[in-house]
Image (cartoon, rainbow, N blue to C red):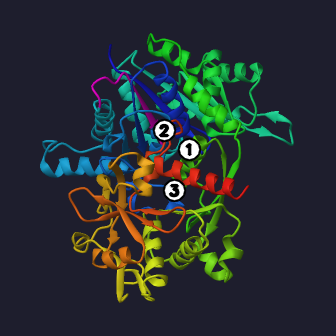
Amino acid sequence: MSIKYIFITGGVVSSLGKGLTAASIGHLLECRGIQIAMLKLDPYLNVDPGTMNPFQHGEVYVTDDGAETDLDLGHYYRYTHSPLSKASNTTTGQIYDTVLKKERRGDYLGNTVQVIPHVTDEIKNRILACAAQAANTQVVLVEIGGTVGDIESLPFLEAIRQFRYERPGDCINIHLTYVPYLKAAGEVKTKPSQHSVQALREIGIVPDMILCRCEKALSDEIKAKISLFCHVAKEAVIDEKDVENSIYEVPIELHRQGLDEKVCKLLGISSPPADLSRWEKMLHTVLHPKGKVVIGIVGKYMDHQDAYKSVFEALHHGAFSAGVEVEIRRFESDRIVENGSVEAAIGGCDGYLVPGGFGERGWEGKVLTAKYCRTKGIPYFGLCLGMQVMIVEFARHVLGLKEAHSTEANPNTPDPVISMLIEQKEIQNLGGTMRLGAYPCRLKPDTLACKAYGKTLIWERHRHRYEFNNEYKAAFEEKGMCFSGTLEHGSLCEISEVVDHPWMLGVQFHPEFKSKPLEPHPLFSDFIQSIVLQKRAKGL
């Protein structure tokens, strides 16, 4: 059987949740035994989001092969088992970069290079490359970023129009739109969806299915109206209302309306019914917790909803495994220093997490957080920069190196306990030049890390330029710091632990990128479990 393709577009407004919807559809197909692959097409001109401000773009998700990608790939990872690599995210910048390099080499034999066919052909090549990642792929889900009507999206929409024309019977389009409820009028309005579909049809794409984002379930009358005006079968108009408790309810809600059955029918795929038993069991735990833990996250992008998306989700996963719910409190690290009292600024949480980040801003507030946790015996989890913060705090207040710092924040520090790799110092460009992707790490037996993982060799994903300076290693170990994880066949310190502390651990990598609701990351699970045990010991 030929590979089938599902193209997912969005209309009316951005931030409707195309990535979450695409991931949910992928999950439902996998629950029917169908092998999938997923691709995000991003219309912006940046080559990748690696140099983009988190306030602009949100989280940068990193794959095993070192691709810096859109945060929607995090949704793909958490909901599905799709292969994820550089072939899973394509931007306009990458497309034009490839086309222009081909033109310079003379690959186009002197022809005028145009959007059609050269740019659209390259987009189609990327779709095929995604399909070719695994030999047994049956369905490829392609999410097109942006909104129908955006100038930036037009080449991608034209490419999928051509792709579908060239493969009749193998492709469908699912259009995600918005059906608002006007409280003053007391009415649900379908006109925005009608205009969105009209714009899509003007491009030459007729949707096979319309998913309607809405606050409340739509009536049959409203669905019939959308069906009539948008030229889509009534049974193919599905509402995707806001879920009440957890984003992990979305696949269940879509399945209840028969979405996966309808998709298989449209594509001509024969498969057994979806087995959602494991997902439903996980959701039961989510909806019926046996307690609560409060985690404070101290970062410098806390006002942005998506800057630490994978961190938030990984904490929830760890809570699922412990049978509790997690309340996340966000703290801007700058405001801790301004407040003057760490206790007043961030007190009241059961544990604290300092996530990754770049630049000088916010350092001192994070250092104060690490000191607060170390001296008070409060569980602390440092991710990437969060580990470096933990190292700097320990150097200043335990080793007595008062001016210890990272050379990223203070290039002139007399004690550079965190410094740039020698090979990084020669690099001028910022994009794609960090230590990126999965690396092996060897764990010391009988350490927090080794007990959490249950093995001595692990693979984790990195995204950073600065490392622990091994010239200070002996001094740290003498004062009670254990470097429990080291780069396999190397000397770089990947995991650090404070020995005489209930749970204070930092990692140079990003474990949040490898956590799923059904497969919580072991470090996040252990972090939450340590807090649960600590609370029980105190009778809380």
Relative height, residue 224 to residue 489 (above, below): above
Q: Quadrant of residue 411?
A: bottom left
First in residue order: circle 2 vs circle 1: 1
Find numbered disc 1 in the image and state the secondary structure of the residue it sits on: helix
Q: Amino acid at mark 3?
A: Gly
**Position in image of residue 336 (x %, y %):** 63, 76
What kind of element bears circle 3? loop
Q: Contact (CB < 8 A) between labels 2 and 1? A: yes
Residue at image position (46%, 77%) is 394
Residue receiving disc 3: 58
In this image, 309 relative to 288: left or right? left
From the image, tell me which residue sits under label 1: 317
Label drawn at residue 519: 2
Residue 152 in picture, x, y percent from top left: 45, 47
Q: Magenta stretch containing residue 140, yes or no?
A: yes
**Tag of residue 278:** none
